[in-house]
Image (spheres, helix red, strand yellow):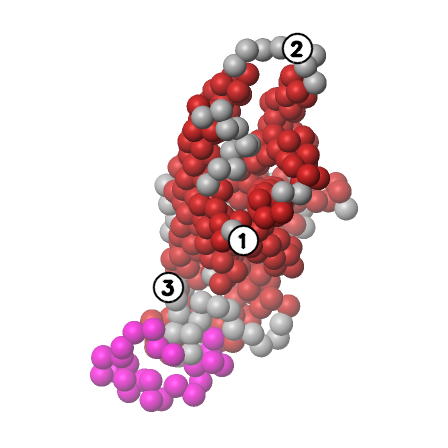
Amino acid sequence: MIENLIVSFSGLIGFLTIFLILLRYQSNRITNIYLVIIFLIISTRMLLVGTLNIDNNPFIIVLLSKYNNLSIVIIPCSYLYFSNLIKDQKEIELKNFNHFIIPLVFNIIDYILENKYVNITKVDYSYYIFFTIYTIVYFFLIFRLLNTNIWNRKGEISIVVKQNQLIKKWSIYFFLFLAITALRLITVLLWEINNTKYIFGTSYLWISAVFWLILYFKIIISPEILYGYTFLNSKINEQKKNDNPIISFWTNSPISAISNSQDIQLNGKIKNSIEQYMSEVDQFSFHNQAYRNAKFSLTDLANKLNIPKSHLTYLFKYHSKISFPEYKKIVRIYDGLELINSGYLATNTYDSLAKEIGFTSYNTFFVSFKDVTGSTPQEFLVKILKNKHYA
C-alpha cells in the first residue's frame, strides 16, 4: 500500500513540477518542450500505475495495456532535450521528427501483433532485445553530445564559466539519473519476462518513483539550476533599459579582505560612493561605443567618467566578480549583438564585426561570444533570421 502511495505521489509532484516549469518557461535556461514531454509521460504513468495498484481499476488496466509502449518516446526526447539545451532552443524543429520514426514503427508492429494479424514466437524477448539496444544506442549518442558540447567546454570569462558549471552539473545529474532509471527498467523487464509475469515493467516501480521524487524536489527547491546564459543576458538587457541599475556581477560588500594599507585608506574615503561608481560604469559602458577602441583601458574609462583611476581599480578589485578585461569582453559582445540585430552582417563579415567592436582577432571574439551568449556568432545569426521569418 505504501509503495503505491509513493508511486501516485510521485506522479502528482511531477505535475506540480511541470506547472512550475511552465510558469518560467521562456526564462528558464534548462527548460524546453522535450523536458516537459518527459515529465508529462513519467508523471502520467506513475499516477496511473499507483492508482491501478490501489483499487485495480479496469479502465486504467486497459489504458496501460494499450498505450504503455508510447513511453518509448522518452528515449529520443531525452536526446532532443539535451540537444536543445546545448543550443538554448525552445521550439520544435521539423527535422527532429525523424527521431520518432522508430518509436512509431515499434508501436505499429505492437498493434499488429496485439491484434494477432501476425504471430511471432517469443515476442516478449524480441521486444526486450530491441528496446535494450535502442536505449543503449541513444544513451551513447547523448553521452557523446554532452561530452563534446558541455562537459569539456572551455571558457574565459569567470562569471560565465560559473554559469556553464551550473549547466554542466545539471546535465551530468540528469544524464546519470536517466541512465539509472533506464537500467532499472531494463533489469525489471528481463525479470518479468523470465518469470512470465510481464506487467509493463512496473514491478518495483516505487524505486523509480523515489528517484523521480528526488529529481522533482531538486528542481523545485534549487532555482540555481535554472540559471545559465539567459540569466546573464537578462541582467544586462534589464540594465540597458533601466536608468540606474546595477548588474549582478557587482557587489556592495568587498569580495575579499582589504589588507593593503593604501586600500584600507581608500575604502574609508570612497565607501559611500561605491554604488554610484557601479552605476556610472554600467551606464557609460552599455550606452556608449568607447569600447570599440581596441586599446580602451581602465585609464580611459577613468578619464571618461572623471573618476580617479585608483578608485576604479579599487572598485574592480573588491566589488566586482569579474576583472576589467572580462568586463570589457562582455560589453563588446553586447555591442556586437546589437549590431547583428540591426543587420550589420548583411553587408559585413564576422571578422569585420569583431574588429568593429574592439577585438584584435576573430578567435578572441569567437571564444568570448560563445562564452557570453552560449552560441557561436553563426548560430546566433541563424536564430535571429529565423525569428524574423516567423514574426
Which residue is tagged 3? 323
262 in the magenta segment? yes
Q: CA distance from mark 1 to mark 3?
A: 53 Å
Residue identifier under label 1: 5
Pointer 2 residue? 118
Nearer the observer: mark 1 or 2; the answer is 1
**Dominant secondary structure of the residues highlighted in magenta in the image:** helix
Front-most of residues 231 and 283: 231
Residue drawn at x 54%, y 32% as measured from the top left: 199
Q: CA distance from mark 1 to mark 2?
A: 39 Å
Start-end of magenta stretch:
253-278
Q: Earlier in the sequence, mark 3 or mark 2?
A: 2
CB-based contact (under 8 Å), mark 3 and mark 2: no
Q: Which residue is more in the foreground, 79 or 291?
A: 79
Q: What kind of element bears circle 1?
A: helix
Among the two numbered marks 1 and 3 on one chain, the one whose residue lies closer to the N terminus: 1
Establish if 108 lies above or below 188.
above
Please say whether residue 385 is visible from this viewpoint.
Answer: no
Residue 299 % position (x, y): 39, 69
* Circle 2: residue type: Val
Q: Position of residue 239 (x, y in %)?
A: 58, 68
What residue occupies the far right of the structure in this picture?
A: 391
Determine whether 387 is above or below 248 in the image.
above
